[in-house]
Image: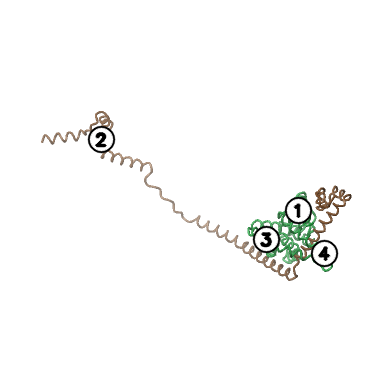
């Protein structure tokens, strides 16, 4: 399926049918949405930018050369959209300043409570997840994008580099700093 | 090493970020660093799991989103089709308009009947006449008159006027 879509996009991108593109949307929308939601922490914006991402991909499908996977290409568009969005969004500054987006920590941490986990383990896990989330908040958007693609999306370093238009060395540097920040937060918990 | 120490810190980060031979070698012989690395990696795994669960949406959400993307794509197609149709038409219309305007007899601006140099000469002549009337002195005598003025301070005498006055006294 992926090969067929890639060849459809690569060889005759302009001739891609509506059905082909719908299949691409259905296949990748969850990951693109998740990446944008984690990056922006705003469900409405993540939803809007996911749509925008696929629309841009459709409009610029002739520029896709098949050198990277369709998903990497889509994540690159998503990252660029998120970057532009963050740059233009001045309200976000006030939102962060007033702590209006701090409730997401609870939402994520609550998801860690599983039926098989002991209360103590669940508590510790929740605290650790919150610390990681807090640490991720301190990162620059570029660093956060690298961090999320590596540890949540479990992408390889070269895939991340391709998705974000970076050198592998820069990806490693961003990750090093991100893990350093996470480690610092976790140490503060103990 | 105490796990809270930061002595071997960078090695833990390097081991977590990607495979690093030196870091792996150190981890094999340093139990606290190994424990620290496990702790960080566990926290990251839990964070990832929490994120995946947090971003989970019901199937209807994805269906609706796909439908919205389809609608936006259709609209974009329609818009680009209209643009592709309209742009050549507008270009053809503009070319036709230029062609028609190019053939029509053009109104050329009329040249000024009096050349600029002549206007200047007339103007100068007028000024000279005016100056001569006001000074009551023939232009040819002007330098001499000025010399008299500078010499004794008396007003210049116009010879024509002097003759007139003499004749009136004779009468």
Q: Residue at x 81, y 64 (%)?
A: A122
The answer to whether marks 1 and 2 sit on the same chain is no
Q: What subunit carries mark 2?
A: B
Kindly identify which numbered label has been placed on residue A156.
none
Residue A79 percent across, percent down from the top left: 71, 57
* Residue at mark 1 to residue at mark 3: CA–CA distance: 20 Å
* Residue at mark 3 to residue at mark 4: CA–CA distance: 28 Å
* Residue at mark 4 to residue at mark 2: CA–CA distance: 124 Å
Kindly identify which numbered label has been placed on residue A120.
4
Q: Residue at x 82, y 69 (%)?
A: A115
Q: What subunit carries mark 4?
A: A
Chain letter, brown? B
* Residue at mark 3 to residue at mark 2: CA–CA distance: 97 Å
For the residue pair A71 and A175, the one nearer the viewer reads as: A175
Left or right for A171, reference B104: right
Circles 4 and 1: CB atoms closer than 8 Å: no
Kindly identify which numbered label has been placed on residue A181.
1
Residue under label 2? B138
Dot 3: few (<14), some (14–19), or many (≥20) neighbours within 10 Å?
few
As helix, strand or loop, the secondary structure at mark 2 comes to: loop
Chain letter, green? A
Is residue B65 in sight in this rendering? yes
Residue A19 percent across, percent down from the top left: 74, 67
Of tags 4 and 2, the one toward the viewer is 4
Residue under label 3? A99
Residue A25 percent across, percent down from the top left: 74, 64
Of tags 3 and 2, the one toward the viewer is 3
Q: Is residue A46 above or below residue B147?
A: below
* Residue at mark 4 to residue at mark 1: CA–CA distance: 25 Å
The answer to whether marks 3 and 4 sit on the same chain is yes
As helix, strand or loop, the secondary structure at mark 3 comes to: loop
């Amino acid at each position: 399926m992926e090969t067929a879509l890639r060849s459809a996009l690569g060889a005759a991108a302009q001739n891609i049918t509506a059905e082909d593109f719908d299949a691409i949307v259905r296949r990748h929308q969850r990951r693109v949405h998740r990446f944008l939601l984690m990056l922006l922490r705003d469900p409405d914006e993540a939803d809007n930018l996911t749509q925008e991402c696929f629309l841009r991909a459709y409009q610029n499908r002739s520029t896709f050369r098949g050198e990277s996977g369709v998903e990497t290409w889509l994540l690159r568009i998503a990252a660029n959209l998120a970057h532009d969005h963050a740059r233009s969004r001045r309200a976000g500054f006030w939102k962060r300043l007033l702590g209006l987006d701090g409730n997401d920590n609870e939402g994520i941490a609550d998801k860690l409570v599983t039926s098989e986990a002991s209360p103590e383990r669940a508590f510790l896990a929740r605290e650790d997840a919150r610390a990681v989330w807090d640490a991720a908040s301190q990162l620059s958007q570029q660093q956060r994008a690298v961090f999320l693609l590596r540890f949540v999306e479990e992408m390889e370093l070269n895939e991340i580099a391709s998705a974000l238009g970076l050198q592998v060395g820069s990806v490693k540097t961003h990750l090093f700093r991100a893990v350093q920040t996470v480690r610092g937060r976790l140490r503060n918990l103990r | 090493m105490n796990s809270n120490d930061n002595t071997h810190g960078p090695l833990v980060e390097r081991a977590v970020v990607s495979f690093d031979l030196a870091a792996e070698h150190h981890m094999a012989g340093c139990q606290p660093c190994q424990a620290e690395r496990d702790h960080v990696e566990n926290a990251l795994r839990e964070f990832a799991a929490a994120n995946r669960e947090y971003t989970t949406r019901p199937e209807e959400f994805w269906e609706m989103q796909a439908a919205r993307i389809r609608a936006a794509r259709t609209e974009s197609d329609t818009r680009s089709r209209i643009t592709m149709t309209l742009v050549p038409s507008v270009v053809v219309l503009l070319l036709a308009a230029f062609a028609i305007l190019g053939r029509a007899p053009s109104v050329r601006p009329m040249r000024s009947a009096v050349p600029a140099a002549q206007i200047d000469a007339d103007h100068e002549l007028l000024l000279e006449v005016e100056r001569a009337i006001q000074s009551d002195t023939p232009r040819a005598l002007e330098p001499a008159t000025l010399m008299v003025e500078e010499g004794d301070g008396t007003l210049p005498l116009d010879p024509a006027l002097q003759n007139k006055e003499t004749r009136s006294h004779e009468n």
